[in-house]
């Protein structure tokens, strides 16, 4: 029987960090401040320093990060937010939850990130924000997007960086490239906790204060509710886990880059189409995603060999029943094409060379059929 690989190897990571994680969590159990304990502030300070942003506000999930950012901008029914349909549902979900309309712009075929050239034509007097997604771990074309936003009255730009925390873009970090950066600490993300968690980054003092109030039910002081908010705090134990993982994070980021480069070498000339990584940025490979034809056949054959795969994402958001009647799009042909061909391979900082060679060899043998 062929041994089955882990799609994401969190067990090896935990073994390397077990003592640090235990000490961090024990400190929380000892002081008993499970909500807004000292680890929350410590993590926010360290993440802000890491990203270069002035403020970091931890929240209960990556989805909540996007929602709170939009609430801080006072998004209201009838407003529009320009974004990509080739993303996880949360990207559009938070827009619809606030009564606004997602306006979808198609992706670039090589990177699967939003094509900034299509944004300007979708701007209307109702456009309240632009929300690019830094998909698969590579930052979108943020300078070009920010320039479009500036030409139209400084429209706020929110980077959905759920998959790209730690990535660099022209010498700067993801989450410090626009009005807001929002990330997720879901366990499978490049920097993950052991539950749900997320963070908002901004260098705007007023927006940061709004986010801090919104995450605690709109309170500016205890029982003083100055705005509508949510219960959106990241709990202290999860912050403790991320603090422990930060000790190894730079090493893990470098490993992800190296493993991504090795996949590219191993798959060169195989007929498997790779994502384009731009020369002025890197990719932290939240997923190592390739393009294949006859995907179902390839996935089934790999599964038989104990090699798991995943599809991020099989149906663009403008075709999802929840959003189809609540959005605007022009068909988004590239998103549809990508949805039929993308396939993610096993990827984590602890992926061994032998396992990676096994994955690549199996895929090479199938790609040419």
Image: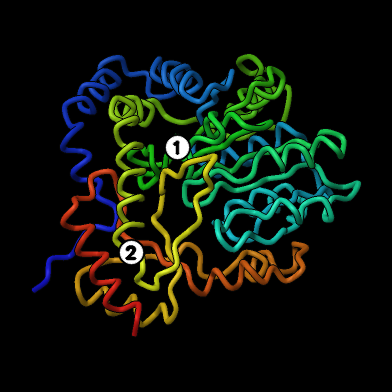
Callout 2: 10 Å neighbours few (<14), some, many (20+)? many
All told, the count of numbered labels is: 2
Question: Left or right of 51: which side holds 217?
Answer: right
* Residue 347 percent across, percent down from the top left: 31, 53
Q: Please tell me whether residue 338 is drawn above or below residue 217 in the rendered image.
A: below
The residue drawn where x is 35% and y is 64% is: 268
Question: Left or right of 23: which side holds 91?
Answer: right
User: Marks 1/2: CA distance?
Assistant: 34 Å
Q: Quadrant of the N terminus?
A: bottom left
Q: Secondary structure at mark 2?
A: helix
Query: Given the current orientation, which residue lies at the most extreme front position?
Result: 269
Query: Given the current orientation, which residue lies at the most extreme right position?
Result: 125
Q: Residue 267 bears which disc, if any?
A: 2
Which mark's residue is nearer the viewer, 1 or 2?
A: 2
Q: Residue 197 bears which disc, if any?
A: 1
In which image quadrant can residue 329 be found?
bottom right
Q: Nearer the viewer, residue 53 or 185?
A: 53
The residue drawn where x is 80% and y is 42% is: 128
Q: Nearer the viewer, residue 158 or 176?
A: 176
Query: Given the current orientation, which residue lies at the most extreme bottom position?
Result: 369
* Residue 161 percent across, percent down from the top left: 54, 41
Callout 1: 10 Å neighbours few (<14), some, many (20+)? many
* Residue 69 percent across, percent down from the top left: 66, 35
Q: Which comes sooner in the sequence, label 1 or label 2?
A: 1
In which image quadrant can residue 273 be found?
bottom left
The residue drawn where x is 59% and y is 60% is: 86
Q: Secondary structure at mark 1?
A: loop
* Residue 148 percent across, percent down from the top left: 79, 42
**Do the residues under discs 1 and 2 have CB atoms within 8 angstroms?**
no
The residue drawn where x is 55% and y is 36% is: 169
Q: Residue 244 bears which disc, if any?
A: none
């Amino acid at each position: 029987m062929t041994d089955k690989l882990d799609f994401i190897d969190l067990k090896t990571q935990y073994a390397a960090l077990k003592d640090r994680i235990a000490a961090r969590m024990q400190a929380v159990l000892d002081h008993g401040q499970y909500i807004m304990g000292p680890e929350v502030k410590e993590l926010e300070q360290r993440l802000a320093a890491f990203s270069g942003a002035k403020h970091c506000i931890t929240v209960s999930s990556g989805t909540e990060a996007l929602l709170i950012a939009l609430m801080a901008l006072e998004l209201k029914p009838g407003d529009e937010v320009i974004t990509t349909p080739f993303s996880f549902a949360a990207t559009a979900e938070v827009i619809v939850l606030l009564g606004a309309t997602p306006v979808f712009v198609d992706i670039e075929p090589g990177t699967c990130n939003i094509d900034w050239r299509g944004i300007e034509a979708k701007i209307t007097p109702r456009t309240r924000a632009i929300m690019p997604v830094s998909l698969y771990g590579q930052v979108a074309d943020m300078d070009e997007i920010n320039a479009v936003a500036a030409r139209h009255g400084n429209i706020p730009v929110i980077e959905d960086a759920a998959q790209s925390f730690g990535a660099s873009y022209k010498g700067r970090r993801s989450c410090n490239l626009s009005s807001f950066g929002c990330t997720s600490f879901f366990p499978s993300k490049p920097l993950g906790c052991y539950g749900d968690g997320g963070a908002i980054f901004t260098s705007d003092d007023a927006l940061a204060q709004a986010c801090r109030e919104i995450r605690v039910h709109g309170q500016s002081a205890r029982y003083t509710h100055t705005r509508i908010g949510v219960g959106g705090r990241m709990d202290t134990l999860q912050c403790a886990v991320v603090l422990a993982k930060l000790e190894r994070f730079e090493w893990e980021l470098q490993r992800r880059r190296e493993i991504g480069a090795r996949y590219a070498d191993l798959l060169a000339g195989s007929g498997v189409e790779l994502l384009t990584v731009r020369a002025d940025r890197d990719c932290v490979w939240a997923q190592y995603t390739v393009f294949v034809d006859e995907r179902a056949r390839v996935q089934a054959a790999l599964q038989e060999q104990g090699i798991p795969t995943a599809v991020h994402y099989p149906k663009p958001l403008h075709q999802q029943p929840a959003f189809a009647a609540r959005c605007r799009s022009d068909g988004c042909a590239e998103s549809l094409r990508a949805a039929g061909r993308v396939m993610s391979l096993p990827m984590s900082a602890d992926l061994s060379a032998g396992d990676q060679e096994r994955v690549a060899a199996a895929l090479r043998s199938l790609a040419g059929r």
